[in-house]
Image: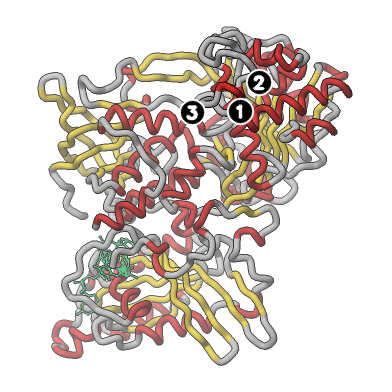
Amino acid sequence: MEEISPKYDVIVLGTGLTECILSGVLSVKGKKVLHIDRNDHYGGEAASVNIEALFKTYGNYTKGEEPWKKYGRANDWNIDLVPKLLMSSGQLTNILVSTDVTRYLEFKQVAGSFVQQGTGPKATVAKVPSDAGEALKSPLMGIFEKRRMKSFIEWVGTFDLKDPSTHKGLDMSRNTMKEVYDKFGLEAGTRDFIGHAMALYLDDSYVDTPGKAPDAIERIRLYGNSVARYGKSPYIYPLYGLGELPQGFARLSAIYGGTYMLNTSVDEVLHEGSKAVGIKATMGGADSPEKIQFETKADMILGDPSYFPGKVKVVGHVLKAICILKHPLAGTNDSDSCQLIIPQSQVGRKNDIYIACVSSAHNVCPKGYYIAIVSTIAETTSNHHLELQPGLDRLGKIEEQFMGAPIPLYEPIDDGRADNIFISKSYDATSHFETTTDDVKDIYYRATGEELKVEGLRDVQVAEQ
Amino acid sequence: MASRAGPAAGRGMNTRFAQFKLVLLGESAVGKSSIVLRFVKDQFDSYRESTIGAAFLTQTISLDENTTVKFEIWDTAGQERYKSLAPMYYRNANCAVVVYDITQSASLDKAKAWVKELQRQANENIIIALAGNKLDLVNEQPDKRAVPTAEAEAYANEAGLLFFETSAKTAENVQELFTAIAKKLPLDQVGPRHTRPGQRPGGVSLGPAEGRDTQAGGACSC
Ligand SMILES: Cc1cc2nc3c(=O)[nH]c(=O)nc-3n(C[C@H](O)[C@H](O)[C@H](O)COP(=O)(O)OP(=O)(O)OC[C@H]3O[C@@H](n4cnc5c(N)ncnc54)[C@H](O)[C@@H]3O)c2cc1C
Ligand SMILES: Nc1nc2c(ncn2[C@@H]2O[C@H](COP(=O)(O)OP(=O)(O)OP(=O)(O)O)[C@@H](O)[C@H]2O)c(=O)[nH]1
Ligand SMILES: [Mg+2]
């Protein structure tokens, strides 16, 4: 067994996507990184697991039975634990490209982005219009509303925060998105799908918050640019599942000298005064014959909330049901993959319900199967399955459903500057990774005092060597 | 963009081109990287330090006038040292070179463990070659040999592996090793070429990585 160094620049705990991106970026920047996970696999909460592991995680079968056997080879399944998609013009895509991690991954478009209008038997599902042309054809709006929507989308395209002449006479620092919608005379239903299916807000608080309009416009633009990049939807997805993403960044880190230890538990965080200065850890999991205890120091420790239960707070709960289907979602033109958003107002909720669906087209399951994950933010303290029901109703016959207790969302209590422990946030209920990359940038700034510039990351480093 | 679907291939008039993913495994310091360096650049370095920033390397060999095989070679980047190799590494590997050092008998045990791991984790049809490296040391000083050729060869036959004793230093059998692998790869089964991501139905290529499949992602510092 290789000698373990007595000192690293950074120790990273947990191999979720946030941690792996940070580990990769810090290694590229020349930091000496030790990256540890207590699990025997990469990805933590953001892993993709096979169907046997999924049954075992949720425990929804009778002991002695092996229900996964009827689903073919377990390893043909890569089921995401976190339902997210990548915006094709989003920040994560930029980071993948600038770090060359794209070389280890292959992506496919998600075939469609849909939104539900109405509820119950009268509910309709329609494609989210992404440009002015599609707006004019969309069944989501009446004839006059289509024209208003078209002029709104065209205006979003020309909007420039720095140029007040493009602001329609509004004060962007003070006015609200409601006032912007009012300018265009948009109807409530249209505001709904713009805010929830294009700007991808989870609730309606953005509408009346003064000064929030530029953010909303930026999000609508990101949506439009992402659709424009490959055509069908704003989303792309890696073959073999999202669990490939942390693995890709871990490989980047390793190539730049990062040291990887899975199956390693952190026994103690060592402190000097108020600062964390290292860890005591044990390599080799519960059933491993040889265990190796070691101690090592570091200038800082990064990690996910599960490694620091006393230093995080719960900020909400996500509800999630992973469902195995044998058919595509109704109303999506038999798309092999899609996102379907049920805006809160359509079903009398405060938070949207998301459905993310992928299939054998993404090498995540055998042919003929579809994996749909229904999720939302919990609004009640019991009967959570009822909260997800409008989403489950969209799925038709469900072969297998995995739904655990509400998943707590954690955030660090402190920013980490006082004790040199920098903790990430849980993966939130959004449908994409934009908030994950925000967290990466925020942690990088808190930990290093520098802004993370992703553009040309590797080129710069190579030039410096 | 990595070709994940291998083998990827195309057919011109009478020419065949196929691309395969090859992974390297073996104990530290047996010469994995050196074998690759010899194969790809025909170089050897006795005092090599860790190179950083090399994603993977590619090398093309011509089996005959009409048949070209391109290897996309992945090194472990050290993730195997504490048993932390990612499934991504094995995924869709068409072939593997498992290396041991003929002057270190324990390195053969390690190689056998890697072969088992590959048979458990990798493609069913993966072609595995066993390479007993540092042959030059034994040619110079026969008493340095710790693994008899016959012993390793018997194991390789039994396990269905290609087998060569190599020297990355003198280049002995390095080209032969890769050529033998290329000959054993299923060149005839290859369908239309899928390497370019844009050509897989619905596949997308992100950013400027396109068309830059020369050595080590343009980021190799060596
Ligand atoms: C094809 C190839 C060419 C190399 N060329 C040079 C060179 O010209 N000068 C130099 O100083 N070092 C070079 N190296 C790196 C060097 O051989 C090894 O990295 C080093 O001997 C051992 O590194 P390691 O054990 O820490 O990491 P390893 O586990 O061996 O590899 C770490 C990463 O380095 C890369 N790498 C490893 N070996 C090589 C290698 N021989 N060439 C390029 N990238 C490599 C791989 O992408 C690997 O993922 C080269 C390595 C390879 C694979
Ligand atoms: N004499 C001799 N030395 C070799 C040969 N191949 C490699 N070496 C030397 O062995 C040492 C290790 O070689 P590497 O190629 O770095 O070994 P590796 O298997 O890649 O090692 P890790 O990357 O640590 O896993 C270097 O000092 C090489 O110069 C060989 O064929 N003959
Ligand atoms: Mg090496």
Amino acid carrying label 1: it is: Phe
Image height check: is A66 above or below B193? Answer: above
| Residue at figure coordinates x 18%, y 84% from the top left | B137
Q: Which mark is residue A195?
A: 2
* Badge 2: chain ID: A
Q: Nearer the viewer, residue A363 or B58?
A: B58
> In this figure, which residue is indicated by the disc labeled 3?
A435
Question: Is A373 situated left or right of A96 in this image?
Answer: right
| Residue at figure coordinates x 75%, y 47% from the top left | A368
**Hey, which quadrant is residue B142 in on the image?**
bottom left
Image height check: is A312 above or below B127? Answer: above
Q: Which mark is residue A159?
A: 1
Residue at the front extreme of this rendering: A165
Question: Are discs 1 and 3 both within one chain?
Answer: yes
How far across and down, in percent of the image, does residue B149 sit?
30, 85
**Which structural element holds mark 3?**
helix
Q: Is residue B147 visible?
A: no
Amino acid carrying label 2: it is: Gly
Question: Is A427 situated left or right of A113 in this image?
Answer: left
Tag 3–tag 2 contact (CB < 8 Å): no
Q: Kindly report which numbered mark, 1 or 2, lies closer to the viewer in this rendering.
A: 1
Q: Quadrant of ligand 3?
A: bottom left
Q: Earlier in the sequence, mark 1 or mark 3?
A: 1
* Badge 1: chain ID: A
| Residue at figure coordinates x 16%, y 52% from the top left | A3
Tag 1–tag 2 contact (CB < 8 Å): no
**Which structural element holds mark 1?**
loop
